[in-house]
Amino acid sequence: MGDPVEIVDYDPAWPEEFAAIGARLREVLGPIAPRIDHIGSTSVPGLAAKPVIDIQISVGSLEPLEAYKARLERLGLVYRADSPELTKRYFREAPGSRRTHIHVRELGSFSQQLPLLFRDYLRAHPAAAAEFAQAKRRCARQFRDDRQRYIAAKEPLVWDIVRHADTWAQSIGWRPGPSDA
C-alpha cells in the first residue's frame, strides 16, 4: 500500500531546496548534464503538491549508465533499476534524506521536453495551475491509500493540460529557458 497520498499547500522553500540539491548535482555532474531542472508540481509557484522535489537531469545519452550513476551514488542517491519507464533512469533520495525524485532523461527527447513544457505552461497560466491543484486534492481525498489509482484519476486532466500547453507552445514558439542549475 505505501505512504498515503498527501497534497499540501505550496511551500516557498521548495525552490531553495531544489537550488541546494541542484548545486550539488551540478558540482558532481559538470558537463555530463547539459541541464538540471526543477520539474513537477513543486516547481510551479503557488501550486499545491505532494512534498517531493522532482529534478530532471538531461544527459546526451542514457547509456552508458556508469557515465553518471556512480557520480549520483556518491551523493547518496539510490538508483532504482526497477523503474518501468524506459525513457529515463530513476534515482531516489539517500535513506533518511528529504524526499527527492531524480529523473535522468536524454536531452531533446520527448520525455525530457514534456515536463519542462508542462511546468512552464502552468507557471504562465495560474488559473490552469489552480484547477490542477483542485483536481489533485480531490483525487488525493478519493484515493488517499492507493497511489496508482490517484495517478490514474488525475491523468485525464494532465493530458488536457498537455494539449493546451502544446497549443500555447506553438503560438509563442516555446523553447526551454536556461538550465535551473
Image (spheres, rainbow, N blue to C red):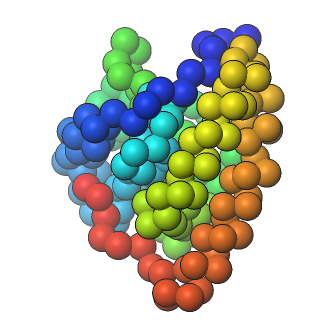
Left or right of 67 in this view: 115 = right
Farthest front residue in view:
127
> Horizontal placement of 89 versus 12: left or right?
right
**Where does the image place residue 82, in percent across and percent down from the top left?**
67, 31
Q: Residue at x 47, y 27 (%)?
A: 8
- Could you tell me which residue is drawn at 62 percent across and 39 percent down? 134
Closest to the observer, 65 or 94:
94
Where residue 55 sits: x, y (%)?
Answer: 42, 45
Res 153 → quadrant: top right
Q: Quadrant of residue 62?
A: bottom right
Q: Nearer the viewer, residue 73 or 129?
A: 129
Residue 36 vs 95, above or below: the answer is below
Can residue 89 be seen in this snapshot? no
| Residue at the (36%, 22%) spot, across then down | 98
Between 22 and 116, the one nearer to me in the picture: 116
Residue found 71% across the figure and 69% down from its top: 163
Residue 96 placed where, x, y %?
37, 12
Name above or below for residue 102 compared with residue 122: above
Q: Is residue 51 left or right of residue 4?
A: left
